[in-house]
Amino acid sequence: MHRTTTSSLALLPLLCTLSLGAGAAEYPASPITLVVGYGAGGGTDVCNRVLAMNVGKQLGQTVIVDNKPGAGTTLSLSHGARQKPDGYVLTALSSAGVLNQVLMPKVAYDVVRDFTPVAMVAQYQAGILVRADSPHKTLADLIKASKSSAKTLSYSTAGIGTPQHLTAERLAKQVAVDWVHAPYKSGPEAITALMRGDVDFMAQTAEWVPYVRDGRLRLLAVFTEDRVKGFDAPSLKELGYNLVAPSTLGVLGPARMQPATVKKLQDAFHIAGQSPEFENCADQFGLKLDYKDAPSYSAYIQDMLKSWTPVLKQFAAAE
């Protein structure tokens, strides 16, 4: 009897190893949720839905998009950080989620400590826009009007702490003007505010692409290193302002996910990001395709925090 018990105990490590291996091989055994920190209908939401559909087909399980908009994606990330690290709840990451943990020290997550990067698939491309009937034909016109108008000009964005918000504020400081920021919960809401005249201009990621193409909005400048392909507007750098908005559209899981699960998800998002459907979505909303695997994405996030933290602390102190 003693011999049998000892033998059984000796087999336990092997049995546990086999069980863990089987579990990894079976993943996913049920639907996966992808939490998106913006409202339905914007570029982040639509393109994540395209990714989710493709990833679901590859993995043989439905990937459900759950919109939790608000507070510059800190609500969705706070929710994602509390989930089990089993790969069944993932969170979409935009740059705002990274930057806001510096701007809002009381947020309930740390993007490096509390998450496992899965993959990055694209970059946002942002810019400054006015309505087609605006008297401002160039960024110089807008700045001149900001200095001479008796009324302080206002602008819309998809939220506080977004790269477009921070870049617009840094530009305002460089040109010595005051602008009133009107934050919304999504790009479509920010666009609607501009279209109906609630604000004078908009600083927003390229959900504006169809509006510029059909002539309803005018793009004055972009926040990218170079001009956005297909559009004539200059970059801020080209205009002499050394400003480039940080950018990422990617996916995270909770901290301490199993490497085998991360690898399976990473590869699925890589394939999904190369699909014709996602490329069409990227073209529609002005995204720049840019894939990074889990290790590269982790380094990218850490580099973003390192380079932008001093700027963000100065910005927060000035508020």
Image: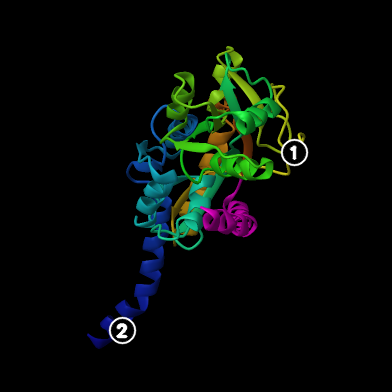
Q: Are marks 2 and 1 in contact (CB under 8 Å)?
A: no
Q: What amino acid is at disc 1?
A: Lys
Find the residue positioned furthest to the front.
150
Q: Where does label 2 land, which residue?
A: 6
Q: Where does label 1 land, which residue?
A: 237
Considering depth in this image, is 172 or 111 the residue closer to the camera? 172
Q: Tell me how far mark 2 sits from mark 1, CA to CA.
A: 71 Å
Q: Quadrant of residue 188?
A: top left
Q: How many labels sit on residues?
A: 2
Considering depth in this image, is 256 or 206 the residue closer to the camera? 206
> Residue at image x 38%, y 55%?
86
Report the span colored magenta: 292-319
> Residue at image x 25%, y 87%?
2
Q: Is residue 213 above or below residue 1?
A: above
Most prominent secondary structure in the magenta stretch?
A: helix
Callout 2: SS = helix
Could you classify mark 2 by the number of other residues whose Cα lies within 10 Å: few (under 14), some (14-19), or many (20 or more)? few
Find the residue positioned furthest to the bottom.
2
Can you say which quadrant of the picture contains the N terminus? bottom left
Q: Is residue 136 above or below residue 235?
A: above
